[in-house]
Amino acid sequence: MDLTQRLPLELVLKIFSYLSHREVVICMSVCKEWHSLATDPLLWKHMYVEKEWGMNEEYIERCEAWARREIGILDECMNNFSKIKAFECEKMKRDNKLFRPVHVTFLHGMEVFLNWKFVYSQRYLLLKNWEKGKYVCYTIPRGQVIVKRDGMHQDRIYCIQFDRNFIVSGSRDRTIRIWDMQRGVCRKILRGHQGSVLALQFDINMNVLVSGSSDRLVIIWNLSSGKIRSIYKGHTDSVLGLCFDAKHIVTCSKDLTVRIWNHFCREVGGKRHHLRILRGHRAPVNSVQLKNDQIVSASGDRTIKIWDLYTGVCLHTIMGHQRGISCLQFDGHRIVSGSSDRLIRLYDANSGKILRTFEGHMDLVRTLCHDSHKIISGSYDQTIRIWDICSGKLLHNIESKDSGHIYRIVFDDVRIMSCGQKKQIMVYDFGKDIDTTFF
């Protein structure tokens, strides 16, 4: 007797959800009924969510809306849709549960679900590429664009950030350039700084870009138009790092200070935007991070300081490196720092305790970033290294000899980007031959 035929569908799917994906695949070959159960999109969605894998929710919602519309209008032409492989249609009751009973009825219409088995398989292949260190490397700008030198930076690139659509880079040539992610071409050049652009951050939802420079200025730009909205003056030397949230901009400088600014001030060159100066470091402050109500700064004086955002009080001073600290990342609980002592250290932010030390770089660790699983670091030794954040094990060593010194690294679920002494952005894409549009 097949009990799956007697139990409610939502209970059967719940049972299947305790299996590994390999076991679910085996279940597909048992019989037609089990094949139908083991390919149910809600089952695979549950397994995907359980992995805590990220997803492009906006794109998924847009695709599902598109499929509902197209299927409703052109039901007889379903086999001709270019995207139809990513969808399955079920007559489902409309409620908010993950596992829902099937109702063979048209009272609630036809609900479209993403083919989560397909999405899961693509994400799994992407994960395997990261584990194997399998990637393709290319540059921004690309191919024929490089020959024409169209939009190319004229000097070394110090800072970059990207999202699904845009790449933004800042250079010693005093410009900020906005690139098309898909085509790899320069869409806009922003001019306003009189010195090297050393730090930047943008937020597409806020339509804002903030940049800092060796000209001592902090400039706030309208991201879509490229026009200057505000100029913040106050630092007496180069602005080396910055970050912001909806209310505050935090900057750090070669002048040994960290400064907090009002994000909403529109007065160009005025003083009302300046809120507070944080003093305490005895050497240039090279990096700064803002999370919740805390600011974390790293300095050439070998210390990391944690500050209260609203009072400006230094809550903790963390020591551990033997030489100046060049970079850090702070996620609210852990601090990861890189130094000219060639080491990377992982700290508990509350206690200041060193949790782990990562050794391997042969020169200054200039840049790093991390997620819950890995740390990616870039060094003057011209390598990019990927580390297991839990074990400290070196997973991959990417030699980037054509890039010279590496100044900045950023990454997402699919790719790593780096910039350095050369005039190009290096991209290491782990999504070759994988449909990554859902991530």
Image (cartoon, rainbow, N blue to C red):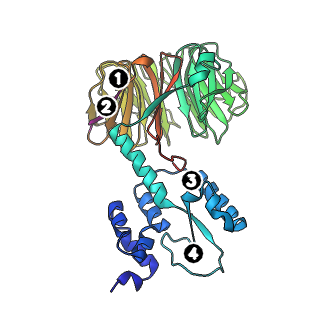
Q: Is residue 38 magenta?
A: no
Give the image quarter of residue 175: top right
Q: Looking at the picture, how far across and down is residue 95, in whole percent?
A: 57, 73
Circle nearer the viewer, 1 or 3:
3
Q: Establish if 215 lies above or below 76.
A: above
The secondary structure type at the circle numbered 1 is: strand
* Cα distance in 3D space between marks 4 and 2: 51 Å
Q: Is residue 397 magenta?
A: yes
* Cα distance in 3D space between marks 2 and 1: 9 Å
In the rendered image, is residue 5 in sight? yes
Give the mark nearer the N terminus: 1 vs 3.
3
The secondary structure type at the circle numbered 3 is: helix
Q: Establish if 401 lies above or below 162.
A: above
What residue is disc 4 on? 92
What residue is disc 1 on? 339
Q: Establish if 416 lies above or below 32.
A: above
Give the mark nearer the N terminus: 1 vs 4.
4
Instruction: Evaluate if marks 3 and 4 touch, with contact meaning CB atoms under 8 Å apart.
Output: no
Looking at numbered disc 4 in the image, what kind of residue is underneath it?
Met
* Cα distance in 3D space between marks 1 and 3: 37 Å
Stretch of the chain drawn in magenta: 392-398
Task: Give whichever of 279, 229 is nearer the camera.
Answer: 229
Determine the residue positioned at 51% across, 36% down: 309
What residue is disc 2 on? 345
Task: Give whichever of 252, 133 is nearer the camera.
Answer: 133
Q: Main secondary structure of the magenta part?
A: strand
Give the mark nearer the N terminus: 4 vs 2.
4
Instruction: Evaluate if marks 2 and 1 touch, with contact meaning CB atoms under 8 Å apart.
Output: yes
What residue is disc 3 on? 57
